[in-house]
Image (cartoon, grey):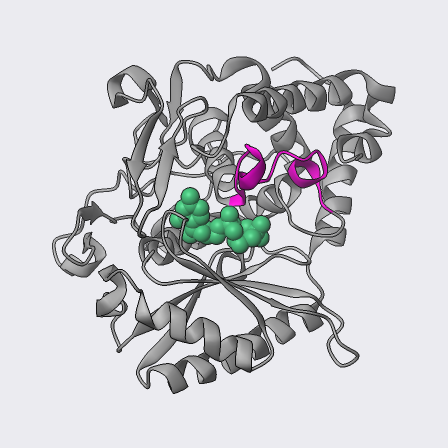
Amino acid sequence: MEQISAEQNHYLNDFSKLIIAEAAPPAAEISVKHTLLKRLEAICKEVSPDAQLIPFGSLVTGFATASSDLDVIFTVGPHFDQSPDDLSSPDFRIPHILESKLQEEGFDATLLTKTRVPILKLVQNATDENPFDLHCDIGFSNHLAVFNTNMLLTYSKCDPRVKKMMISVKSRSKIKWWAKKRHINNTYRGTLSSYGYSLIVLHYLINIVKPAVLPNLQVFPVPEDTPTTEIVFEEAGDDIFDIWFYKDINALSKSSNTMHVGELLRGFFEYYAYTFQWGREVVSIRTEGGLLTKQEKGWVTAVVRPGKTENSEVKNRYLFAVEDPFEIEHNVSRTCNGPGVGRIKEEFRRAVRLIRYRDGGKTMSECLCME
Ligand code: CTP
Ligand code: MG
C-alpha cells in the first residue's frame, strides 16, 4: 500500500466515525421492526398454527443501518428444516394464502415467484404513530441464510471493527454511504447485494490486510463431540451443505492488527481497485488464502439454469465471482452484469483517488459518498 500522511490518516479516522454515528438506525426504528415481526408472526400462525418467523440478515448481524429491510424465513414446526411441504407443488399454497391474508390485514404484500426462491415482499408505510417505512422480505426455503447470518455475526463478535467496516461500505440507509450512495448496491440493476459486500469485506479482513484482523473460522478442525447439525445441513430432498465454522471465539487470541477503521477502509478500496484480479479470481472466504480461480471452479461462461420456483430461471454470470461460504456452487455476485462490474471497479478506483489526492483527504467524507 502507498504511504499516506499522518494528516490523511487522521481524516480517514474522522470519516469512518462520522459514517458510523450517522448510519446507525435509531433505537425507535429497531423497536418498531421487532413489533412488526411479532405482528407478522401472529398472522402467520393464523395461516399455520406451528408457523414461526426466523429473522436473518442485518437485523441479526447488527450490520443494519437506518431503513435496512427486515429479512425473515417462514417455517412450520419447531425445527426450521420443515418448510411448507407443499412448497414444491406448482401452486405454493402457503405463500399464496399468506399473501392474501397479509393484504386483508392492510399490508402492501406481493409474492414473487420468478425469483430464485419464492419471496413475499411486504411494505408497511409510515403513519402518525410509526414514522418509519418498513420493508420486509419473507422467504420460505432459504435456510442456509440463517447459518450464514450466524457466521457473519460470529465474525462481527471477533472484532469491533468488523461491524464498523460493514456499515461504512454498505447501507440501505437514507444517508446511504459508499456503495449505496454511489449506486453500486442494487441487485436489480446489475450490481452487488449487501451480503456480497459483507463477504468481500470479510475476505479483506481475513486474508489480505496484514496482520489479519480476523481468523478464517471455516478452516478450524471440527471438535470430536460436535453435533452433526452444526457440521452439515441437508436441504429437504436436495443437496447437503458443509456449514461448519468455529464458534468458540472467546478461546481465540485477539488480532495484533491495530489499524483504525479508516485505514482498513483505505486498504479495502486499494485492494479491490488495484490488486484483486476481477477477470481471473474468485473470492472464497471458506478457503485457506481466500482466493480460487474461475478456471478451477468452472465459472467461466454464463449459464441459465431453472430456479426453485415454477417457470423461474437463474442467470449465472461470472463477471465478478464471490463464492457463497456454504452454498459453494452459488456465485453471490451473479447479479452483476458487465456495466455493473465496470461501475463497481470504477468506484473502487475513484475512492482510492479521493483518499490519496483530495485535500490530503480533508473533504473525503463528502466526496466518497456524494450522489
Ligand atoms: N443472502 C444469501 N444469499 C444471497 C444474498 C443474501 O444467503 N445471495 C442472505 C444472507 O444471509 C444475508 C441476508 O440474506 O445476511 C440478507 O441479505 P442482504 O439484505 O443483502 O444483506 P443485509 O446484511 O441484510 O443488508 P441490508 O441491511 O442492506 O439489508
Ligand atoms: Mg437485508
Q: Check if residue 177 falls in the magenta segment.
A: yes
* Relative vertical location of residue 235 with respect to residue 270 in this rendering, above or below: below
Query: Which residue lies at the image location 46% right of the left edge and 83% below the top edge?
Result: 43
- The image quadrant of residue 50 is bottom left
Image-quadrant location for residue 166: top right
Looking at the picture, tell me which residue is in the foreground, 212 or 235. Answer: 235
Q: In this view, does 246 lie to the left or right of 369?
A: left
| Depicted 355 relative to depicted 13: above or below | above
Image location (x, y in percent) of residue 163 = 57, 49
Given residues 319 and 173, the one toward you in this image is 319
Q: Which residue is drawn at 21% across and 46% down?
A: 242
Classify residue 136 as left or right of residue 93. right
Q: Which of 213 and 198 is in front in this view?
A: 198
Which of the two residues, 189 or 158, is positioned nearer the viewer here? 189
Region of the chain picked out in magenta, as a range: 176-194
Instruction: Tell me residue 173's x, y (percent).
Output: 69, 52
Identify which residue is drawn at 25% across, 72% down.
79
Q: Which residue appears at 25% of the width and 49% of the height?
A: 243
Residue 74 point in image, percent of width and height: 37, 69
Residue 35 belongs to the span the image colors magenta: no
Note whether 349 is above or below 139 in the view shown.
above
Q: Does the rendering let one see residue 226?
A: no
Left or right: residue 273 versus residue 337 is right
